[in-house]
Image (cartoon, rainbow, N blue to C red):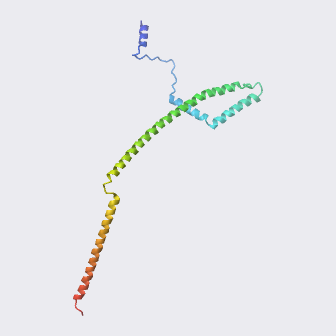
Amino acid sequence: MAERDRRAALSRLDQPRETRRALLPRPTLSQETFGVWSERFARFMGTAMFLIAMTVFVVFWVAWNVLSSKNLRFDAYPFIFLTLMLSLQASYAAPLILLAQNRQADRDRVMLEQDRARDERNLADTEYLTREVASLRHSMGDAATRDFVRSELRSLLDELEERGLEIHRRDAGDSQDATAGSSKDLPAT
């Protein structure tokens, strides 16, 4: 009866299942850690150091199995074991390289979306500023501009200078007349 109730409880979809305890803890490897490791591996496989090391390894393998005595050879001429080793390496390398490429493609996609969003914001800001400048130009059509005010001030300054010169000349002329008139009024000695 208890077993039937337990099975009935497991078949119900509206209730969570009991978690089972594992005898041994499972090793956990996050996707991010594995992805970073695959990118490092793919990056290493694309270096000249890896190509040189792999070439040295294959040349040593072939030379050992061709030039050494028959009892020291471990892989005969068709080099089946070497082919198996290289195929095994390639079978693991290909998915890791594809994983690294997928991660790079995801990063590129995110960067492209961020660039597109930034470009849209810049375009909106530029359009806003363009409208603001256009409205300022429109409103400034009836207002005095800086150049107009400067020219008006310059003409007023010139006019004041001319009046100042006239006043100075008139004062200078009056003082000369006064000096000349005062010498006439004095008796000659």
Looking at the image, which is closer to me, 156 or 44?
156
Q: Residue furthest bottom?
A: 189
Residue 58 at what x, y percent from top left? 69, 31
Relative to residue 9, is residue 104 depicted above or below? below
Looking at the image, which is closer to me, 34 or 157?
157
Relative to residue 93, is residue 163 depicted above or below? below
User: Where's the N terminus, which quadrant?
Assistant: top left
Residue 169 at what x, y percent from top left? 29, 77
Looking at the image, which is closer to me, 138 or 74?
138
Q: Residue furthest right?
A: 69
User: In this rendering, would 155 be left or right of 30?
Assistant: left
Q: In which quarter of the image is residue 143?
A: bottom left
User: Where's the C terminus, which quadrant?
Assistant: bottom left
Q: Quadrant of residue 43?
A: top right
Q: Which residue lies furthest to the top in this view?
A: 1
Residue 172 at what x, y percent from top left? 28, 79
Looking at the image, which is closer to me, 75 or 22?
75
Count all numbered tags in the image, as a single digit.
0
What residue is drawn where x is 57% and y is 34%? 40
